[in-house]
Amino acid sequence: MTPNPAAPLSKNEVLKQNDPTLGGQLGETLADPALACFSSDDEQFLKFHGIYQQDDRDLRKSGKQYIMMVRARISGGIIPPEQYLAFDDLSERYGNQSLRITSRQSFQWHGVVKDNLGPLMKGLNDALCTTLAACGDVNRNVMAPATPATSALVERVQEDARRVNDALLPQTGAYHSIWIDGEPLKLTAEEKQAFTDPLYGKQYLPRKFKIAFAIPPLNDTDVYSNCLGLVAIADPADPTRPLGYNLLCGGGLGMSHNNPATFPRIADVLGFFRAEQLVDVAKAVLTAYRDSGDRTNRKHARLKYIIAERGADWFRQEIEARAGFKLEPARPFHFDRQGDLFGWHRQMDGRWFLGLYVETGRIKDTPDRQLKTALRRIVATFRTEVRLTPSQNLLLAGVTTDQKDAITAELGAHGIPVENQAGAIRRASMACPSMPTCGLGLAESERALPGILSLIETLLADLQLSEEEIIIRMTGCPNGCARPYLAEIGFVGRAPGKYSLYLGGNAGTTRLNQEYRASVKVDEIIPVLRPLLTRWKSERTGGERLGDFCARVIWPEQKIALVTPATPETN
Ligand code: SRM
Ligand code: SF4
């Protein structure tokens, strides 16, 4: 579907063009206590400031109650202790008393009423955290492996992720003026219109843009699902340093039900470049997208559609022309797993980290488990660094041997075991927030998945398959926020209590799964899965995983073609 040059610009493009400072009327509305919410135009500007105007969907019948969601910009998921304590405090004072780890290693504050928005944003700034460009038509949270034990490259790749993150931040002064100085940007309409961001120009990107780093063989960031993926290749002379990166472009997961022009896509491998060329390459990819994306149809505006239509070779040449050098042939790499390490592990530097399973990424206190309180006490006492993972879990890092037992005891006192934190399928699961905050949710997700996992756990126990890991992910709509199209079992919301069922992702999340049933009611899930898992048990070869079994046996039966990276990875 080639963009129609005669088609009018989408509404968002006109908004950005008319106010490239992205300030809109945000400052004025914020300062006016008589206004309960922001205008629909300003909702679009708010996103660039990391804020979504939502309403509590549980309360819709009794009238719309506006609440905001605020998303931090945290490159690579690393949070110093003082910052974590400030985040926790802000969630108590201005949010809904929970902190939500996102599927891109960041935090969200939900349930922020308008009067609390200013103090929350100021508090985040005081904690040296920005929310600028956490959402909007810009480069979003950059993901990078954060587990300090999986590769000698982790800390250097984290530094590279921060460099890319910083180089791609928009420069508007509106953010500082509104949220830190507490007043609208003092510019006339003409002066606002004259502003041009040095990198993004006047209209920013056609749509969101996402970057992830990965260090093989662990694909914890699901790198193939990003617009720009960077696969680190170690320097043979110094294994703590990346020699360079394989460049992956054109991944993305969002789609709409019943609209075949929209689809999830995994990235193409375009070549290899040296570490010192990183920022130039990232800017080349971003500006190529900026200049060639569809600005008339937002459903067709992601980089993945450009590459799907114009081809990887065309895009490679575009990058080379912009970066000013040729990419080398891709270096061999292979991913064999995703996910996190739980419990105590030694870091590369000899200290310890603790991997903590966080159900659906929600840090909160419940009568049985006071995770939020326990984390606050541990971080306050031991000044532990917090690291967020792309699977919505958390690591307490930099722990010394003499602190370990006290941390284990503190967690235990709040109902959280350090060993056997959750069963095999729960540890490998993810769910998006959906109800009650997400305005796009068609079905429950975060609130439904734990119960559905319990049903599947019972089924697996019945079949004596309890020890098997199956990657299960759920979203409340087809936008793909918990990356369900890379799971071995993906549940994608269609309507209240109904999900499309996807099967066939793999352990390294390098393969898209495929729709197996278009609409399954919650009480049909086990009847649908039972015969499938029974066949898997009897027909699998060796330790074959469920996703691989589905791709080998079920897909051919359903005449589904295999979708793997266009340039296959090599060993
Ligand atoms: Fe997402 C929109 C939550 C990762 C694809 N996403 C939304 C919104 C903001 C709803 C909205 O536009 O009104 C959701 C807010 C819900 C709430 O109440 O919190 C939302 N997305 C999330 C998070 C919090 C889900 C989670 O479980 O953690 C993730 C935040 C990550 C971050 O820190 O930046 C999140 N979203 C993703 C991912 C996964 C990823 O990036 O690795 C995807 C699929 C990858 C991709 O982008 O293709 C994703 N979100 C979308 C889309 C579909 C975009 C598309 O191309 O069609 C939307 C809808 C949109 O943009 O219009 C969306
Ligand atoms: Fe909302 Fe859909 Fe994203 Fe879930 S997948 S958070 S329902 S947009």
Image (tube, rainbow, N blue to C red):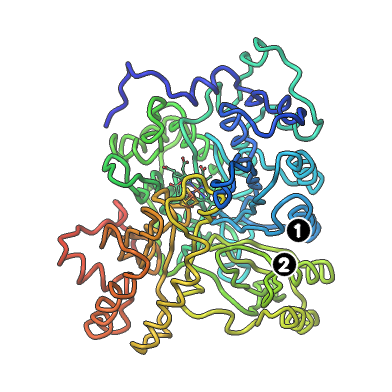
- Residue shown at 32% from the left, 42% from the top: 262
Asked whether the beta carbons under mark 2 and mark 1 sit within 8 Å of each other, the answer is: yes
Is 449 situated left or right of 88 in this image?
left
Q: Quadrant of the N terminus?
A: top left
| 10 Å crowding of disc 1: few (<14), some (14-19), many (20+) | many
Q: Quadrant of the C terminus?
A: bottom left
The answer to which of 321 and 505 lies nearer the viewer is 505
Q: Residue beneath label 1, please?
A: 88
The answer to which of 268 and 77 lies nearer the viewer is 77
Quarter location, residue 150? bottom right
Give the mark nearest the N terminus, 2 or 1. 1
> Could one spot residue 238 in this view of the protein?
no
Residue 116 drawn at (x, y percent): 76, 43
Q: Is disc 1 placed on a helix, strand or loop?
A: helix
- Please determine whether, in this image, residue 253 is positioned above or below residue 6: below
> Could one spot residue 371 in this view of the protein?
yes
- Please determine whether, in this image, residue 242 is positioned above or below residue 260: below
Could you give the CA–CA distance between mark 2 and mark 1, rounded to whole angstroms?
Answer: 8 Å
Residue type indicated by callout 2: Lys
- Please determine whether, in this image, residue 318 is positioned above or below residue 227: above
The answer to which of 216 and 197 lies nearer the viewer is 197
- Label of residue 372 in the image: 2
